């Protein structure tokens, strides 16, 4: 399988090198740009870039303008980096079609995890829309779930919740973020409804063949006072 191309755009060479080193270790091909104009030149020349890591504050063209220009032609996933932690900036980014928003300083490992989560959502990392975590396998296209190679029947929302967890493997997800992503912003129920669905989901993901290993659903971890994450 060919390496996926990631375009890293930041006017700080040290930051580009830090991000590039971690991405290369995780088997990605990395292209670099030091300003907005160079970023657009590379993006429109290469054509097959899988994701863009884009700094906000840059010379020539800032990240917002680069995002606007690229969004006029492409839905390529974009992660915005910023030294500011301002809600207005974050809302602006999402209104422009940004997929993720990360404030500096950040952990390169977390950045890589978020990149992989986004690429799984866009199926760039999952062949035929299939996802795996521990003993659990999901076929998104067929809407099927298996534990230890045995089919498991889930409700529509349970399936959506499991897919969301698996597409964000290793990432801590708040109850509010899960609610907004799986139930959408127009759902006004108590966020604790997620706890009920997770409880039901775990009970259905037990697994019989390798019961001595514990319940397969235990890969869904509770983060007390915050939310959940799934990890192998």
Image: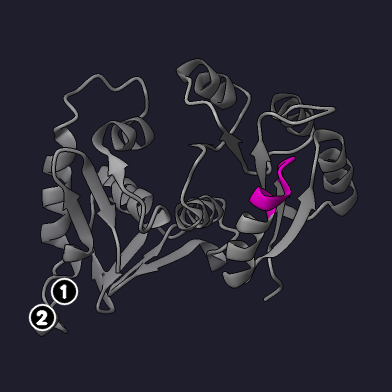
Q: Position of residue 155 (x, y in %)?
A: 23, 48
Q: Is residue 12 magenta?
A: yes
Q: Is residue 191 magenta?
A: no
Q: Position of residue 162 (x, y in %)?
A: 30, 53
- Is residue 160 rendered to the left or right of residue 131? left
Q: Residues within 10 Å of mark 1 (few under 14, many from 20)?
A: many
Residue identified by numbered label 2: 211
Residue bounds of the magenta highlight:
9-16
Colour treatment of the image: one colour
Residue 2 numbered mark, or none: none
Q: Position of residue 47 (x, y in %)?
A: 83, 51
**Along the line of sight, the residue nearer the viewer: 119 or 109:** 109
The residue depicted at 30 percent of the width and 73 percent of the height is 134
Number of marks in picture: 2
Residue 207 numbered mark, or none: 1
Cα separation, mark 2 vs mark 1, equals: 6 Å
- For the question of whether residue 6 can be seen, the reply is yes
């Amino acid at each position: 399988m060919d390496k996926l191309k990631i375009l890293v755009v930041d006017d700080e060479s040290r930051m580009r090198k830090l991000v590039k080193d971690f991405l290369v270790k995780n088997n990605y091909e990395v292209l670099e740009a030091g300003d907005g104009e160079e970023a657009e030149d590379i993006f429109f020349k290469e054509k097959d870039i899988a994701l863009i890591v884009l700094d906000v504050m840059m010379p020539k063209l800032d990240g917002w303008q680069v995002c606007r220009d690229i969004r006029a032609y492409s839905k390529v996933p974009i992660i915005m980096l910023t030294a500011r932690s301002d809600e207005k900036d974050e809302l602006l980014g999402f209104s422009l079609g940004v997929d993720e928003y990360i404030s500096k300083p950040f952990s390169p490992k977390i950045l890589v995890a978020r990149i992989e989560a986004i690429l799984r959502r866009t199926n760039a990392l999952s062949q035929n829309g299939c996802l795996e975590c521990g003993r659990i396998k999901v076929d998104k296209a067929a809407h099927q779930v298996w534990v230890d190679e045995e089919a498991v029947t889930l409700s529509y929302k349970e399936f959506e919740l499991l897919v969301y967890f698996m597409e964000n493997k290793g990432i801590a997800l708040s109850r509010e973020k899960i609610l907004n992503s799986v139930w959408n912003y127009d759902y006004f129920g108590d966020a604790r409804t997620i706890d009920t669905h997770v409880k039901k989901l775990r009970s259905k993901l037990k697994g019989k063949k390798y019961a001595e290993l514990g319940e397969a659903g235990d890969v869904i971890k509770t983060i007390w006072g915050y939310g959940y994450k799934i990890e192998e």
